[in-house]
Every structure is written in structure tokens, then in C-alpha cells.
Image: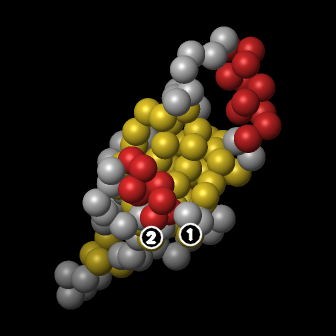
Amino acid sequence: MLFSKPTQDLISKIFYDKDIYVLSKTDKLDDEGGLVKEEDTDDLIVQSFKGNVNYTQLGTLQAELGLVEKIDISISCSTSVEVKLDDLIKVNGVIYQVTSVLPYDSHEMIMGVKWQA
């Protein structure tokens, strides 16, 4: 469905109320070759955007979209947001790895799983 720019702006203002941060993906290894998880990820923020975050009824969403992988979060946002598969995003202090980015009606749907270094 196509909406005019003023309508898209109004939708964004009303529904996209959570701050989402895209993090740079830098791997750091310890002396033994193990992956080190960054404790302070604020230095890794490369971009931010607003979105509507959903943690519930993800199974229904997975079935509706035909996704086979488990998801821990879904985010609807403006179609102008540039997020790619495997990007790391931070929402409410938790880091997620993006598993799907799909156009959905007048917005974009980003799905992810909790990231563990």
C-alpha cells in the first residue's frame, strides 16, 4: 500500500517510538583466540533510527511471513532505514543479530535473534 509522504511521517511519529541502534561489527580476539564481547557498545553505534518493537506473538508472525528461523524480536520501521542481514542492532540495552529484513505493507520489518559473542 502506498501512502503519501505526510501520511508516512504521521505514522512514523505515532508508532515508531523506540530508539534502535545499529552497531559496527568488530571482532576482538583475546590472547587465546577467543571472541571478546564488547561491554560498552555505545562506542560502536554507527546509525540510529526509530521503530515499533515487538517481543510477543512472534510465532504467529513467523508463520505469517513464512520464516523458518526462530526470532526474538520484530521491528517495524520506515522503508528508508538501511539495515542488512547479520547487522547487529541494540534495543533497550540488548543486542540482536538481524536475520530478516522484509518489505511489509507501508513499512519494513526487521527480525532478529539475541546475539551472543
Image coordinates of residue 31 in percent, x first then y, are 24, 85
Which quadrant of the structure image shows residue 77? top right
Which quadrant is the N terminus positioned in?
A: top right
Q: Is residue 66 left or right of residue 75?
A: left
Image coordinates of residue 54 in percent, x first then y, are 61, 58
Residue closer to the observer: 31 or 35: 35
Please tell me whether residue 91 is drawn above or below residue 1 in the rendered image.
below
Image coordinates of residue 117 in percent, x first then y, are 36, 76
Mark 2, residue position: 114
Q: Residues within 10 Å of mark 1 (few under 14, many from 20)?
A: few
Residue closer to the observer: 20 or 2: 2
Residue at 21% x, 87% y is 32
Helix, strand or loop at disc 1?
strand
Query: What residue occupies the far bottom of the structure in this picture?
Result: 32
Residue type, numbered disc 1: Val
The reply to whether residue 87 is in sight is: no
Mark 1, residue position: 94
